Amino acid sequence: MINVLPGYEKAAYRELKNIEGIKDVYHVFGEYDFVIIIDVEDLNILNDVVDRIRESETVTATKTIVGAEL
């Protein structure tokens, strides 16, 4: 889940869509601006993708939740 600078939602969306490993980007309303689905092989790659997201000048906060298949 990601928050971005107010007024930069479209720019952030375009930037996020171009990061390798991000499968889906959903603009949402509420506490967060975007929900991002990341599909990678392992936690090391996940960490790299999250680091790239956090490097964006438009991103102000992230919250990562790791899901598992049942």
Image (cartoon, grey):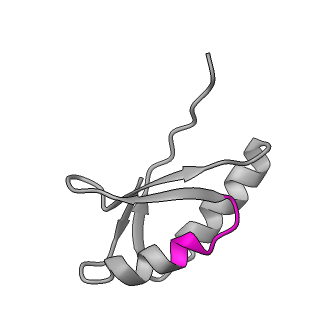
Q: 39 or 54: nearer the eye?
A: 39
| In-image side of 69 versus 14 (left or right) | right
Per the rendered image, the range of residues in magenta is 15-21
Q: Determine which quarter of the picture holds residue 26.
A: bottom left
Q: Visible in this render: residue 58? A: no
Which of the image's four quarters has the C terminus? top right
Q: Determine which quarter of the picture holds residue 50.
A: bottom right
Residue at 63% from the left image edge and 64% from the top image edge: 51
Residue at 72% from the left image edge and 60% from the top image edge: 48
Q: 18 or 61: nearer the eye?
A: 18
Residue 45 falls within the magenta-colored stretch: no
Q: 52 or 36: nearer the eye?
A: 36
| In-image side of 30 versus 4 (left or right) | left
Residue 17 falls within the magenta-colored stretch: yes
Is residue 43 positioned above or below 47 on the image? above
Task: Tell me residue 45's x, y (percent).
Answer: 76, 53
Task: Tell me residue 65's x, y (percent).
Answer: 51, 39
Q: Residue furthest left?
A: 30
Task: Tell me residue 62's x, y (percent).
Answer: 44, 57
Query: Number of numbered discs present?
Result: 0
Q: Visible in this render: residue 62? A: yes
Task: Tell me residue 52's x, y (percent).
Answer: 63, 70
Residue at 20% from the left image edge and 53% from the top image edge: 30
Residue at 48% from the left image edge and 79% from the top image edge: 14
| In-image side of 66 versus 46 (left or right) | left
